[in-house]
């Protein structure tokens, strides 16, 4: 968040400049900051939001068992966090969850065709993201 806050702080005084000068100054001063931010997001140092406390949430197995007992299909649709989307790979926790799901005989379904516009923040989907996810679920359930 500090990097994003720094971008906004650096941009705020530029609004006082005439449009052409503001645009030139943004290219000179802000563009390197934006590039640095996205390089950081793509780096191995940032692996996304830490969702685990050392173990997989037992709710995955509990939901599977409930569905088996009720003879209801159990579908798990995984979508990448924004950082995983940008890296085009799941982070270590994502891989851990996928391995766990396979170990309890659940084959996750992966979203495809998402774009950066599908994300509201690093993990939550935007309105467009929810609509695209709903279309995926609709296809699965038919």
Image: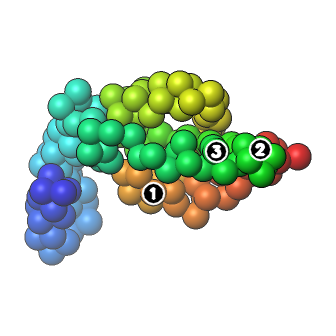
- Is 100 on the left-hand or right-hand side of 25? right
Mark 3 touching mark 1, by CB under 8 A? Answer: no
Residue under the image location 21 percent in, 43 percent down = 37
Density class for disc 2 (Cα within 10 Å; few <14, some 14-19, many ≥20) is few
Mark whose residue sits in front, 3 or 1: 3
Density class for disc 3 (Cα within 10 Å; few <14, some 14-19, many ≥20) is some
Density class for disc 1 (Cα within 10 Å; few <14, some 14-19, many ≥20) is some
Residue 94 point in image, percent of width and height:
41, 34
Q: Secondary structure at mark 2?
A: loop
Closer to the camera, 4 or 12? 4
Q: Quadrant of residue 11?
A: bottom left
Mark 1 touching mark 2, by CB under 8 A? Answer: no
- Is 26 on the left-hand or right-hand side of 76? left
Mark whose residue sits in front, 1 or 2: 2
Closer to the camera, 63 or 132? 63
Q: Which mark is residue 65?
A: 3
Residue 15 point in image, percent of width and height:
19, 72
Q: Which mark is residue 124?
A: 1
Residue 81 point in image, percent of width and height:
42, 44
Residue under the image location 15 percent in, 70 percent down = 12
Find the distance from the CA under tag 1 to the CA under tag 2: 25 Å
Find the distance from the CA under tag 3 to the CA under tag 1: 27 Å
């Amino acid at each position: 968040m500090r990097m994003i806050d720094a971008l906004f702080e650096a941009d705020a005084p530029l609004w006082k400049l005439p449009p052409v000068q503001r645009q030139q100054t943004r290219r000179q001063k802000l563009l390197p900051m934006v590039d640095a931010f996205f390089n950081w997001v793509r780096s191995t140092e940032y692996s996304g939001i830490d969702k685990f406390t050392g173990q997989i949430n037992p709710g995955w197995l509990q939901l599977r068992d409930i569905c088996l007992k009720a003879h209801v299909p159990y579908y798990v649709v995984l979508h990448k966090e924004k950082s995983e989307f940008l890296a085009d790979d799941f982070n270590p926790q994502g891989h851990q969850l996928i391995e766990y799901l396979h170990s309890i005989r659940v084959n996750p379904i992966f979203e495809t065709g998402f774009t950066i516009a599908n994300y509201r923040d690093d993990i939550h989907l935007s309105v467009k993201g929810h609509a695209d996810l709903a279309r995926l679920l609709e296809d699965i359930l038919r």
